[in-house]
Amino acid sequence: MSRPSHIRRLDIYVAFAFAAADVLLEIDKHGQVVFAVGAARALLGWPARVLSGMRLDDLIAPADHGRAAAALAPQPELHLRADRATRYEKVTEIMAMAQHYGISRIAFVTEGKAQSAP
């Protein structure tokens, strides 16, 4: 008997996400764990099966709450588009300035080739 397609998609999502993590936690907008899998006991002190329903704050040492909040906060992203005449040094200068001010997500915007009118 075949599994429903939405279950297969969920399995694929979990496999990809877990491949890059020792513990995979899914939390809701209130910071409550709704799904957990992985080496939770070794890393967090709790087995994964009991994490569901716990608050993320309860899993992080109080001294680390500030760093955790900063890591989970939405990060600004700079979209940078430079024309062909812009010197590379200017682009790297702007990137360094952005990083200095805490912007680590930088996207380069390009334009496709202009199409001639028919």
Image (cartoon, helix red, strand yellow):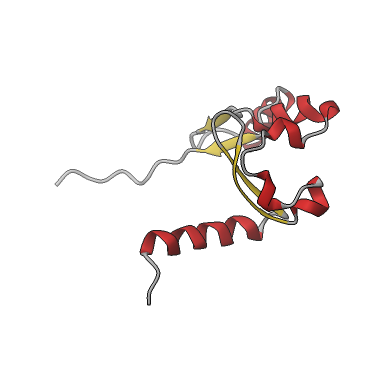
| Residue 38 image position (x, y, % from top left) | 70, 57
Residue found at the very far right of the displayed protein: 63
**Looking at the picture, how far across and down is residue 54, in whole percent?**
66, 37
118 or 71, which lies in front? 71
For this rendering, which residue is in front, 28 or 90?
A: 28
**Residue occupying the far left of the picture:** 118
Tag count in the figure? Answer: 0
Quadrant including the N terminus: bottom left
Residue 62 found in image quarter: top right
Q: Where 71 falls versus 51 (above or below)?
A: above
Along the line of sight, which residue is nearer the eye, 38 or 88?
A: 38
Q: Is residue 24 left or right of residue 86?
A: right
Q: Where does the image place residue 15, in percent across and percent down from the top left?
A: 58, 62
Task: Name above or below for residue 27 compared with residue 8.
Answer: above
Identity of the residue drawn at 74% across and 52% down? 47
Q: Residue placed at 68% from the left, 44% from the top?
A: 51
Locate residue 39, reporting x and y percent: 75, 56
Vertical arrangement, residue 117 with respect to residue 48, above or below:
above
Q: Residue furthest bottom?
A: 1
Q: Kindly identify the residue that appears in the image at 78 percent across and 34 percent down.
A: 60
- Image point (63%, 57%), residue name: 18
Q: Is residue 8 left or right of residue 65?
A: left
Q: Is residue 79 left or right of residue 67?
A: left
